[in-house]
Amino acid sequence: MKKALMLAMLVVAAAGAWAQSPVRLVYAEPCQTSGGGMSWYYTDYYVHVDTGGIGVYIPYIHYQTSAGQPWQDAAMSLLGNYGTHSLYYVRIQDASLRAAVKCNWFYAVSGMSFWATYWDNNEGADYRTCAWGSDPGTVAGDVGGHVGLQVCSNYVSSSTFRWNGRAFPLFWNTVSGNIVVENLSFAKNVGIRLTKDNWATFQDIPATYAYNMWVAGSANVEVWKFNKKVSLLGLGSSFEFAVYYTDQATGITYWDNNFEQNYQVSAGGVVK
């Protein structure tokens, strides 16, 4: 009995150890498209779940199509597991939604079961999106925490070093990727903060604006790209980083640091 009680206390302590909810909206993309005399309305949701701990995580989009309508849960599909976190996705066939991310957590051991429900509800305001932002009180797409990693790869690139009339090839570990940003104001600094030596030193790698997801109505979501040769091949190939976004109008910097554990990408690897 004492052993079971101690085990239960350890599980509860582990489940409550998160400094923040282990679920986070990456971005919501409402879309309205047409062709061949037909129209399509839907919203795509991408969600990160902190799956580095014990137990099973089952995320949903908890949504309402309009005021007075019942709330519904849309189960999400796993797109990838990246060790510290997983990426989930779902498409809901409506382009104007009020929604929050809901995640049920379960754990069973020694005949005992534990469960909890975690939320990302935009600090109580919910995520209210609509294609083109055409409904009152909505935005044309949203990003959880105002900034999020979409993808980062660590690949080998080459350059040429010339010395004494001769050309020598150099091979580099290069990081490249996309960041999604909520368009809070025009002037902004976006990028990743990366370390090769467990934060004894670090460097900021700036990203440049690429495009808005405006084609089908998500103009509030911007995509920024980065690409940087980080180190010569063989001189450190695994990197740790966090994503930043500074709104120059307010001076506020927002971070996506992967639930306070940062992102990790090794040589030849991809993280989303």
Image (spheres, grey):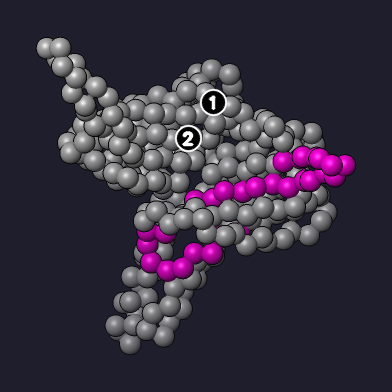
Q: Is residue 159 visible?
A: yes
Please state which amino acid type lies under the numbered disc 2. Asn
- The residue where tag 1 is placed is 210
Crowd class of label 2 (few under 14; some 14 to 19; many from 20; radius 10 Å): many
- The residue where tag 2 is placed is 178
Marking on residue 72? none
Quadrant location, the N terminus: bottom left
- Residue 228: x and y, percent? 34, 28
In this view, 39 is above or below 158: below
Q: Secondary structure at mark 2?
A: strand
Q: Residue at x 41, y 64 (%)?
A: 15
Crowd class of label 1 (few under 14; some 14 to 19; many from 20; radius 10 Å): few
| Nearer-N-terminus badge (1/2) | 2
Position of 111 with respect to 198 (left or right) is right
- Residue 210: x and y, percent? 54, 26
Is residue 133 within the magenta segment? no
Please state which amino acid type lies under the numbered disc 1. Ala
Prevailing secondary structure of the magenta residues: strand
Q: Residue at x 62, y 28 (%)?
A: 212
Position of 205 with respect to 173 (left or right) is right
Residue sitting farthest toward the left: 164
Gap in angstroms between the C-alphas marked 1 and 2:
9 Å
In this view, 1 is above or below 189: below
Query: Mark 1 near mark 2, Cβ–Cβ under 8 Å?
Result: yes
Q: Secondary structure at mark 1?
A: strand
Q: Is residue 253 visible?
A: no
